[in-house]
Structures are given as structure tokens and as C-alpha cells.
């Protein structure tokens, strides 16, 4: 059986079509995953900002204590699990470090590389 030029051309075009559709599908999937990660990061940053805006007025008071700052943090992130790690009290997206007198000294985000 003789293979004609048109059969070869059609086969090559079919392979090219399948390959290009595969590439477009991969690109669309990758864009969707990237968008999902961006959305998650945006939500975490938004939550951290909301928590910080709730805590700052309390923490800026000279009479603020560890408990008053953490109580404000709990109201900003009511469904979060509170825990302590590496000298920070973590509530929601933020970690709070206090000195020996109970004054707030440092705040870190949960995605901080430090």
C-alpha cells in the first residue's frame, strides 16, 4: 500500500493539533494553579492586615499587656488555633513576641522566612 503525500500531511497535521492542544491544556492548568496560589496568598495577607489593624490600637497603649494584645488578636482571628513557638505567641496569621514586662516587641507574619 502506497502512502500518499496527503496522508503524510494529514498525519503530521493531526499530530501537531494534538500536541498544540496538549500544550494549551497544560498552560491553562498551570495558570489555574498559579491563580489559586495567588488567591490564597492574597487571602492570607488580607487576614493579616485585618488582624494587625485590630491589634495596633491596643498595642500602642502604654498600659498594654501581653494578655490585652493577645485578646485583641483573638477577636481579629476568632477561629484560629493559638500556639507558642520560638518565643512567639501565634494567633491567626501573626506571631507576637513580648519582653519580660509583657510589652509587645515584635510581630511576624506566618509566611515570613525568618
Image (cartoon, grey):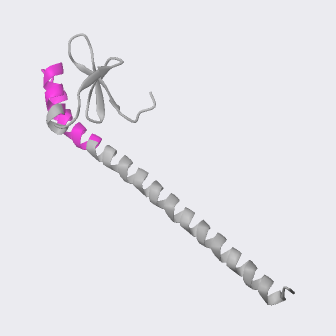
Q: Does the magenta run of residues contain 60? A: yes
Q: Is residue 61 visible?
A: no
Q: Position of residue 20 (x, y in %)?
A: 63, 72
Q: Position of residue 50 (x, y in %)?
A: 23, 43
**Quarter holding residue 35:** bottom left
Residue drawn at (64%, 73%) of the image = 18
**Direction from residue 103 to residue 12 in the image, left or right:** right
> Nearest the camera: 22 or 96?
22
Q: Which residues are magenta?
A: 48-73
**Quarter holding residue 63:** top left
Residue drawn at (22%, 38%) of the image = 51
Q: In the rendered picture of this protein, how many numbered marks are placed on residues?
A: 0
**Quarter holding residue 16:** bottom right
Q: Residue furthest top?
A: 100
**Direction from residue 12 to residue 86 in the image, left or right:** left
Residue drawn at (79%, 89%) of the image = 6
Q: Quadrant of the C terminus?
A: top left
**Direction from residue 32 to residue 91 in the image, left or right:** left
Q: Is residue 113 visible?
A: yes
Q: Does the magenta run of residues contain 62? A: yes
Q: Position of residue 33 (x, y in %)?
A: 46, 55
Q: Position of residue 54 (x, y in %)?
A: 18, 38
Mostly what secondary structure, the magenta segment? Answer: helix
Q: Residue furthest right?
A: 2
Q: Is residue 68 placed above or below 50 in the rendered structure?
A: above
Q: Is residue 19 placed above or below 67 in the rendered structure?
A: below
> Nearest the camera: 57 or 11?
11
Q: Quadrant of the N terminus?
A: bottom right
Q: Is residue 72 placed above or below 12 in the rendered structure?
A: above
Q: Residue furthest front?
A: 1
> Nearest the camera: 93 or 55?
93
Amino acid at each position: 500500500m502506497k502512502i500518499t503525500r496527503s496522508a503524510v500531511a494529514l498525519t503530521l497535521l493531526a499530530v501537531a493539533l494534538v500536541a498544540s492542544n496538549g500544550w494549551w491544556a497544560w498552560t491553562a492548568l498551570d495558570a489555574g494553579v498559579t491563580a489559586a496560589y495567588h488567591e490564597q496568598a492574597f487571602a492570607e495577607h488580607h487576614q493579616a492586615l485585618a488582624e494587625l489593624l485590630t491589634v495596633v490600637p491596643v498595642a500602642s497603649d502604654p498600659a498594654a499587656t501581653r494578655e490585652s494584645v493577645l485578646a485583641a488578636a483573638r477577636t481579629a482571628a476568632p477561629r484560629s488555633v493559638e500556639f507558642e513557638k520560638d518565643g512567639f505567641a501565634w494567633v491567626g496569621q501573626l506571631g507576637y513576641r513580648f519582653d519580660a514586662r509583657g510589652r509587645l516587641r515584635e510581630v511576624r507574619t506566618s509566611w515570613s522566612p525568618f
